[in-house]
Amino acid sequence: MKRFLLLSTSIIIVLASCRNNNDFLQESLDLANENREELEKVLNHYAVNEADSLKYQASTFLICNMAGKNSLDTSSVAANQPYFDALVKYLDRYGWYVDMTIAPVCDSVKAALGDKLQLPAPAYSANIKTVNADFLIKHIDRSFEVWKKYKWAENVTFEQFCRYVLPYNAHQGIWEGVFPYYEQRYAFLADTFPGYTAKQAGDYIIDAVTRDFAPGESAWKAYPFLLPANFRNIVQARIGECADRNSAAVAALRSVGIPAVLNQVPYWGNSNAPHFWTEIPVGDTVKMKYDNTQKPFKSPEDILVNDMYWMVEPVDSQDISPKINIRYSRTAPKVYRIGYEIQCEALPFRTKEEIPTFFQNFCLQDITEKYIVCRDTEVRLQNKNSENIAYLCCYVPENLSWTPVAWAEIKNGKAKFKQLGIHVLYLPAYYKNGIIVPAGEPFILYANGRKQTLIPDKNKRIEAEFFTKVPYRSHVKFYAEILKGGTIGISNKANLSDSVVLHRIEKTPFYEQIIDVNNSGAARYAYFYFTDKRYGFLAELSFYGIDENGKEIELKGKPIGNKGVGANNLEKIFDKDRVSYFYRDMYAEKFIGVDFGKPVTVKKIVFCPRSDDNGINPDEEYELFYWDGGWQSLGKQRGRKDYRLVYDNVPENALLRIHNHSRGKENRPFLYKNGKQEFW
């Protein structure tokens, strides 16, 4: 008992040192203003009973670290409640969003509301000024109850309990009913699998919670006013993005006494968006560190950082042009833990400057070294004025800009950054008036600590050919690879018993494929036959012939064969959208095709594997840029008929990117080395 008391007391002492040795608890109570009385009720409730000494320490921990925690005011978004009520009702009836029918459910609510439709006015409130004594006391008592109740929590120390079981919030806000809600769903594990460790039970729950969530992108796009959503609606409607799913998983784990915390990659080094995952911080859960190199997936043991692979299926690294580099995994520049406990080293304690939103969190803890092979590096900065903090940024393709992932204090015009993920592209920068301002040249940090600084040599120009505007990733390769062995042919019988093969796919098709056909003969049916036993994807399929005037025309008809799965149905094959795709029902026919209604002669076949549609497409307009303090244009070109671009004015050692002006916004920076695009 005394050991646990010392641990929690030491936490308070450390936190107090962040504030110039002031009494941290007293400061928290002062910040509460009119809510101080409610917080003191909690402290007094446990202070009067010596048997509740641990609970008193726990209540002190919660209050000491409550500063900076904000929650969405549910009443401010009450106008949205009919939408979430409808989604929950739908789930109660069907158990899942059939065909991802989130937007249609919202459409029906909007129609029913008619003139009563109101837009919400989201507002946030500080927990320290609004959380009442009754809520905290019930939560503390309940947290202690599950800590002692479940066998898998018996080795959880009081320090771990305070940090990872006790917190009442899970990053995305507060819902008083979330812990009873999830305990009711997952308490059965204790009886069903009595030998489960915290890690085993926790892994089951994380998988169950995150698998139950539907992506909210389609609903948010059609109904942007549904964001932000309160935590109750996120949990019960089971809809949201990466942070939402994992906040729910954290709450679910804590509801049964399993320590849990949210980890975040602030932004992937070679891909879009930040990434969140749930960690169970008990025992040594990380056996190896990820070195950010491109290695194909072979087994689950290869996953060293959550969601690092684009495709968790083995992908053949061969059978593609030697001019194309396959990228198998995302790279992580930094990893931060978003806990409840205030961190003394957090950036708000280090500067009075304006700082980026991500780093305004008092509870960010840098844990990169736990997961990633790291190096420290010193950067000499340019254009310095009065700033005392510098940042390293990763590229953000959506707005052709950069986002900060690491910070360091500036001393004598230089900044020493610690624990940086290797094999990542970084840009030094300042943060001024809400804008990232470059403070030096971009560089790539390698395993030995060497930096390759990317300064374009405009006096040395080379010729370069380009095949894609983003990396050729393993999942795109996989979707194309499973088409190998497939056949395209014609038949005059509906059952294809007299079929004639016009083309056999011998190697992995790279984006769109055009097949010229000679002497095919006339036939009523044309088909695509899949050979893979488990999968079958295809984005587009079309057949062309010659009309009576000798002009090439597309041969139209009625779709036949496998109907597809859900929204990925047969119609997607013929919608002229290379991003949408057909997904074969593995229990139905192994072919898809067209009934032309009469015999016709096929002269050309065009098909597209399921893909991200980021190859170079004929006749679409592209522009090549290089980085020189900003993105500088090297001119526009139309995609060639051989699916590539060729430029003869590319500066050596330049960081490049390609923009498609015709369609699609995806892009990634790259180098041109040894005749290949090397993406970052």
Image: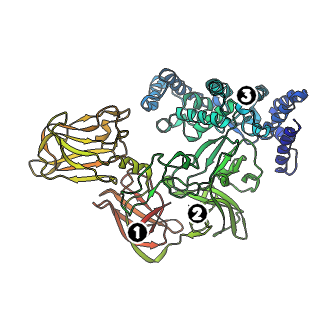
Marks 3 & 2, CB-CB < 8 Å contact: no
Q: Residue at x 23, y 53 (%)?
A: 515
Asked whether the beta carbons under mark 1 and mark 3 sit within 8 Å of each other, the answer is no
Residue at 32% x, 47% y is 483
Q: Three-letter amino acid code at disc 3?
A: Val
Report if residue 118 is visible in the image. Answer: yes
User: Three-letter amino acid code at disc 2?
Assistant: Leu
Q: Which residue is mark 2?
A: 427
Mark 1 residue crowding within 10 angstroms, few (<14) / some (14–19) / many (20+): some
Work out whether residue 613 or residue 372 is closer to the camera in this orientation and state it: 372
For the residues marked 1 and 3, what is the alpha-carbon distance in whole angstroms? Answer: 60 Å
Residue at horizontal 40 percent and vertical 74 percent from the top: 462
Nearer to us of marks 1 and 3 is: 3
Report the label total. 3
Residue 160 rendering spot, x and y as whole percentages: 75, 39
Question: Where does the image place residue 42, in percent across and percent down from the top left?
Answer: 83, 29
Helix, strand or loop at label 2? It is strand
Mark 1 or mark 3, which has the lower sequence index? 3
Query: Compared to 584, does 391 lie above or below?
Result: below
Q: CA distance from mark 1 to mark 2?
A: 25 Å
Q: SS of the residue at dot 3?
A: helix
Q: CA distance from mark 3 to mark 2?
A: 47 Å
Residue that mark 3 sits on: 146
Residue sitting farthest toward the top: 93
Whether residues under marks 1 and 2 lie with C-beta atoms below 8 angstroms apart, the answer is no
The amino acid pointed to by label 1 is: Gly
In this image, 161 relative to 335: left or right? right
Residue located beneath label 1 in the image: 675
Left or right of 595 on screen, residue 360:
right
